[in-house]
Amino acid sequence: MDIERDSQVLTRLDIEALSLSRGERRLFNGLSFCLSAGEAAALTGANGAGKTSLLRAVAGFIRPDAGTIVFHGPEGVMEAETARRSALHLLGHHEGLKPQRTVRQELGFQIEWLGGSAEAMDAAVARLKLAPLLDLETRKLSAGQRRRLSLARLVAAPRALWLLDEPLAPLDEVWRSVAAELMAEHLAGGGMVLAAVHDPLPVAARSLDLGGVR
C-alpha cells in the first residue's frame, strides 16, 4: 500500500514548544520538531526522560503542559481526533494483549477493530510466521512472539504514523532483521516512524535526545 495515496493519511507531524510533566516533575520543556512522510526519528535519552510520555502525548493519552501537536494530511491540518483514530499505530512497551485469547482471536479482534481485512490478516500472519501460534493463548507466548503479534497489526491495518516504544527490545537477531524490513517498507511507502529507543533504529533516522540524568 502506498500510504501517501490515502486521503485520510498523515503527511506531516508538527510538534511545537511542547512541555510534558509526570506528577510534579517536568520531563522536558519547549520541544519542537517536524516529521514528514518517509521520515523516521529516534527518541533517545535517559530512563525517565519522557520518551514514552511523548509517544503517549502524540497518541492523545497525555495532555501536554504547553505547546502543540498538529497533524497534517494531503488537504491541510487534520482534526487531532481523526488523525489519532484513523492514521496512527501506538506499539507500547507492554503489548496490551488479552491473556485468555488465542493469537487468532486477538489478532482477528485487532484487525477488525482497526478496519483491516481477512486477506490482510492472512498476509500479516504469513509475514510474521504466526501460523504455528494461532491456537495458543497469548499468555503462553514468549516476549518475542508477543512482539511479532503486535507487529502483525501494523502490517494488516496500514496507518501512516508508527509510534514505537522500544520496538526491537524483545526480538532476536532474525526478527530484528524482519522488523527492519517492515520499517523500511513503511517509510518507502510514505509512512513515518517515531520511536523511543535505547538501541539504534535499523533504518535511517534522525536522533532527538530528550536528555535526562543518565
Image: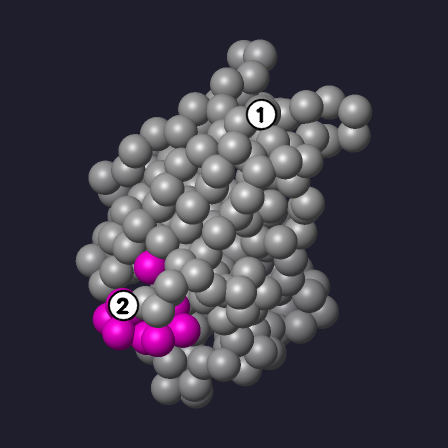
Residue 4 numbered mark, or none: 2
Q: Is residue 114 left or right of residue 201?
A: right
In magenta, the rendered stretch is 1-11
Query: Along the polypeptide, which appears first: circle 2 or circle 1?
Result: 2
- Give the main secondary structure, helix, strand or loop, of the magenta stretch: loop
The answer to whether one can see residue 142 in this image is no
Question: In the picture, residue 48 is in which quadrant?
Answer: top right
Quadrant holding the N terminus: bottom left
Q: Position of residue 131 (x, y in %)?
A: 42, 74
- The residue located at (47%, 64%) in the rendering is 78
The residue lying toward the viewer, choosing from 67 and 49, is: 67
Under circle 2, the secondary element is: helix
Instruction: Residue type at mark 2: give it.
Output: Glu
Q: Position of residue 38 (x, y in %)?
A: 25, 53
Instruction: Residue type at mark 1: give it.
Output: Asn
Residue 66 numbered mark, or none: none
Q: Is residue 9 left or right of residue 95?
A: left
Marks 2/1: CA distance?
A: 32 Å
Which one is closest to the eye, mark 2 or mark 1? 1
- The residue located at (35%, 75%) in the rendering is 7
Q: Can you identify the residue that label 1 sits on?
A: 29
Q: Residues within 10 Å of mark 2 (few under 14, many from 20)?
A: some
Q: Position of residue 28 (x, y in %)?
A: 58, 25
